[in-house]
Image (cartoon, rainbow, N blue to C red):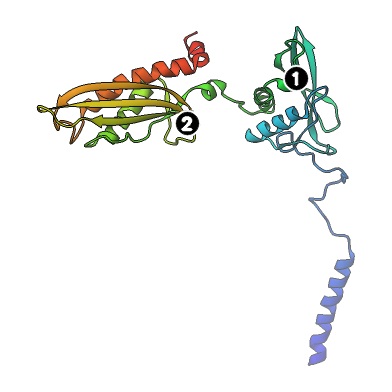
Amino acid sequence: MRFNYFIPGLAVFALLIVAACQPLERPFQPTVKSGTRIVPGPRASLYIEPVQNGPEELSVALAKKLQDLGIAAFTGDKPENRYHVSSEIFLKDKASYVIWTVMDPQGEKTNLTTTRKIGEIVDGMPIDTADLDTTALHSASDIDIMLGGSGINFEKLDKPRVYVPIVADAPGDGSETLSAAMQDHMVKYGIDVLPDQWQATYLIKGTVSITKPLAGTQVVSIVWKLERRNGEYVGKVEQKNRIRAGTLNGPWGPVASAAAQGGARGILKLLRQAEPAYFNKKSG
């Protein structure tokens, strides 16, 4: 009985061996094998060459700005088989310029090129005193657009952005209502109000003081200070009014809006003085 079962099993085994010796079909195998690796696109790997006739800091700054825009840019040793950006600085009409050109992995020029002004040449001013950070920022925006990005919205970047913390020392609900009213009026004036002070370029700090009751009245003073994010003092707006004693110990109601409206007008004047380039561009 064992012999009868062993023979069929042996036949199956032999068939398997024979089948294993035959070449197998590989329908998904490419007919031509390639020995080259796929080259990453320029946004995935972009080498920034040292600037010709210019400071090395400019190429480093450009790489950093491109990284902020989502492009994997880098400097250092030049890799093989990668997209890269070449550059050259030249002088024209007493000003210095840099021209950036995107090169393909074989080192051939593409039609992607942009030129940016670095600065004026005044009495032989060395190029390293120019504003390289601004040049790198605008150059990165150009390259990002050439590589399919949206670039940088410089109008939005230059626009003043304010943060209004809770007003200090206000009685009743004045601390919250004054802050909220100031935010509302600044928005009506077209100023961006942000919820995070670290993203803002200016802070509007309000403080309230009230005198002791005298003959049934009090004098309320509100001071709005405008400061840059780094703490630099820009200016202030002061408001004073005589009120019936105890009027503001509860809800401020429409008083908060009226006070903030006057304060916002004064803050807007200070912003216009602090940011003339933005407001002149807007009005023009």
Residue positioned 53% across, 22% down in the render? 158
Displayed quadrant of residue 206: top left
Q: Nearer the viewer, residue 263 or 136?
A: 263
Residue positioned 39% across, 18% down in the render? 268
Residue that carries the numbered disc 2 in the rendered image: 231
Q: Is residue 109 left or right of residue 121?
A: right
User: Which residue extends farthest bottom?
Assistant: 1
Residue density around tag 2, few if under 14, some if 14–19, many if 20 or more, within 10 Å: few
Residue that carries the numbered disc 1 in the rendered image: 127
Q: Position of residue 16 (x, y in %)?
A: 84, 72
Lower position in the chain sequence, tag 2 or tag 1 = 1
Residue 261's tag is: none
Discs 2, 1 touching: Cβ within 8 Å: no
Q: Is residue 254 left or right of residue 132?
A: left
Q: Nearer the viewer, residue 44 or 14?
A: 44
The CA span between labels 2 and 1 is 32 Å
User: Quadrant location of the N terminus?
Assistant: bottom right
Displayed quadrant of residue 254: top left
Q: Position of residue 208 (x, y in %)?
A: 28, 31
User: Which residue extends farthest left?
Assistant: 215
Evaluate whether residue 13 shows in this view. Answer: yes
Q: Is residue 242 left or right of residue 202?
A: left
Disc 2 residue type? Gly
Disc 1 residue type? Ile
Q: Is residue 37 left or right of residue 166?
A: right
